[in-house]
């Protein structure tokens, strides 16, 4: 029997949200390419893979796929070259998570001041 469970967030994402190291990352993937890497599904807001270069404060930069909610990638807020705040697991550098909300991303991308 084949079973699929939707609406679950992988445990590592919750752990990286709480305990991950903060860093800046530069988005490599153009907005039109973001949906080519759909990774999973969590409720109505699925997960998307976005290619990034992570620039840790105290470590060597590295490339990887950042996990972002689909809602964080809409409206052109993740253009190639954008700098975003992420958290990552230093023991598993393939676990990179976008931690900015849509409002913050929108203001940065379109240069809107508070």
Image (cartoon, rainbow, N blue to C red):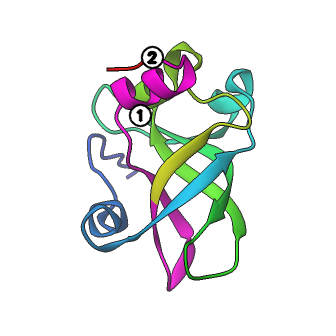
Image vertical order of residue 63 relative to residue 44, above or below: below
Where is residue 67? Give x, y as percent: 50, 49
In terms of sequence position, does the residue under pointer 1 or pointer 2 come before the other? 1
What residue do we see at 64% from left, 37% from top?
A: 82
* In front of the other: 81 or 67: 81
**What's drawn in magenta, residue-wise?**
87-111
Image quadrant of residue 62? bottom right
What residue do we see at 30% from left, 66% from top?
A: 11
Separation of marks 1 and 2 at Cα, in angstroms: 27 Å
Image quadrant of residue 105? top left
Answer left or right for 69 relative to 73. left
Count up the numbered dots. Answer: 2
Where is residue 42? Give x, y as percent: 32, 39
* Quadrant in which the C terminus appears: top left
Where is residue 108? Give x, y as percent: 50, 28
- Queried whether the magenta region covers residue 23, the answer comes back as no
Image vertical order of residue 96 relative to residue 45, above or below: below
Where is residue 39? Give x, y as percent: 54, 45
Using a 10 Å C-alpha cutoff, classify the residue at mark 2 as few (fewer than 14 neighbours), some (14 to 19) or many (20 or more): few
Answer left or right for 48 relative to 54. left
Image vertical order of residue 42 relative to residue 13, above or below: above
- Queried whether the magenta region covers residue 96, the answer comes back as yes
Answer left or right for 43 relative to 24. left
Q: Which of marks 1 and 2 is in front?
A: 2
User: What label sits on residue 46 in the rendered view?
Assistant: 1
Disc 2: which residue: 112
What residue do we see at 37% from left, 52% from top?
A: 1
Q: SS at mark 1?
A: loop
Image vertical order of residue 66 relative to residue 45, above or below: below
Image quadrant of residue 49? top right
* In front of the other: 104 or 42: 104
User: What label sits on residue 80 in the rendered view?
Assistant: none
């Amino acid at each position: 029997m084949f079973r699929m469970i939707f609406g679950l967030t992988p445990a590592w994402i919750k752990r990286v949200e709480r305990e991950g190291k903060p860093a800046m990352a530069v988005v490599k993937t153009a907005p039109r390419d973001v949906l080519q890497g759909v990774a999973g599904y969590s409720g109505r807001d699925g997960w998307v893979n976005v290619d990034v270069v992570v620039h840790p404060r105290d470590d060597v930069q590295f490339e990887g796929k950042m996990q972002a909610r689909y809602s964080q990638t809409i409206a052109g807020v993740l253009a190639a070259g954008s700098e975003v705040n992420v958290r990552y697991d230093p023991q598993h550098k393939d676990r990179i998570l976008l931690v900015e909300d849509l409002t913050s991303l929108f203001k940065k991308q379109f240069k809107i001041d508070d």
